[in-house]
Amino acid sequence: MPDTSWVAAVARLRARRESGVLVTVATVRGHAPRDAGAKLVVGRSETWGSIGGGNIEAVAIDRAREMIAASEPGTELVDFALNDKVTGPHGVQCCGGTVTVLLEPLPVVGAVAVFGVGHVGLELARILARQDLDLHLIDTRSGMLGEARLDVLADAVAQVHVHHTPLLPEEVLEELPRGTHVLIMTHDHAEDAALCDAALRAPHLGSIGLIGSAAKWVRFRERLRTEGGHDDATIHRIKTPIGLADITGKEPATIAVSVAADLLRTFEADGN
């Protein structure tokens, strides 16, 4: 029966939002410690599974941790000759065969928080759920987060996290992972304003986007400056309007496509 413990290890790293490397014995010719398909998961300080121990595994772990430390690691294939004439940095393995090992980076995926799961928010969630990311959906209205309504996300690729916050939705901001991109589109302008103020006080967040008209932003910007005490440079962290400027349709699905496309462009710039 194949060893599937590596699946849990990959899930563990994702849940911790830690990068890692999946190491797989890709090909084996002759005798080797493990058959093709054996896997090892390498994190910054832990490993799970095994590709046979000895020099192969030690070298693979060293290289995996170099990849974790690199800014943009790529997939690599490494060949090993297992004979007593080849001395590796961690000793000799003389099984007599040759092994090719595949190293695949497991980067930390992007994270998005959508505050307000109304018509536009739900359409946006449907699009973003098709991406490999952590998707947080937050609303003060329990009806917006009902199982039947969110059933359209049942086949999501994303990890979907639902937050019902009937009183203070801005408290969720502190719980979000570092670098989370925040989109504010609730049903209540007062709620939007409170979220904008709180988001500007949370330096661990990624981009901050606000849905709405130019007139709404004029009011919000003045309130953030006079009541919130934010300077212009800080207020400039908020992008409004959100989405691609040349997509002007007002239907919820059209707005959602525009916002999602703009956000994915931001992910590309971030390297996610």
Image (cartoon, rainbow, N blue to C red):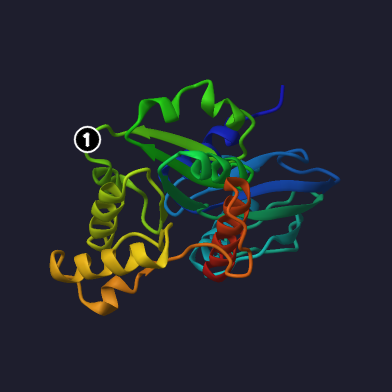
Q: Is residue 52 visible?
A: no
Quarter of the figure with residue 223: bottom left
Q: Is residue 115 visible?
A: yes
Q: Is residue 139 left or right of residue 99?
A: left
Q: Is residue 252 left or right of residue 231?
A: right
Q: Nearer the viewer, residue 106 or 58?
A: 106
> Residue 2, percent across and down?
71, 27
Residue at position x 53%, y 66% from top?
Answer: 266
The quadrant the N terminus occupies is top right
Disc 1: which residue: 167
Residue at position x 42%, y 48% from top?
Answer: 113
> Residue 221, percent across and down?
27, 69
Q: Amino acid at mark 1?
A: Leu
Secondary structure, mark 1, is: loop
Residue at position x 26%, y 32% from top?
Answer: 166
Q: Nearer the viewer, residue 22 or 109?
A: 109
Residue at position x 41%, y 49% from top?
Answer: 185
Q: Nearer the viewer, residue 108 or 227?
A: 227
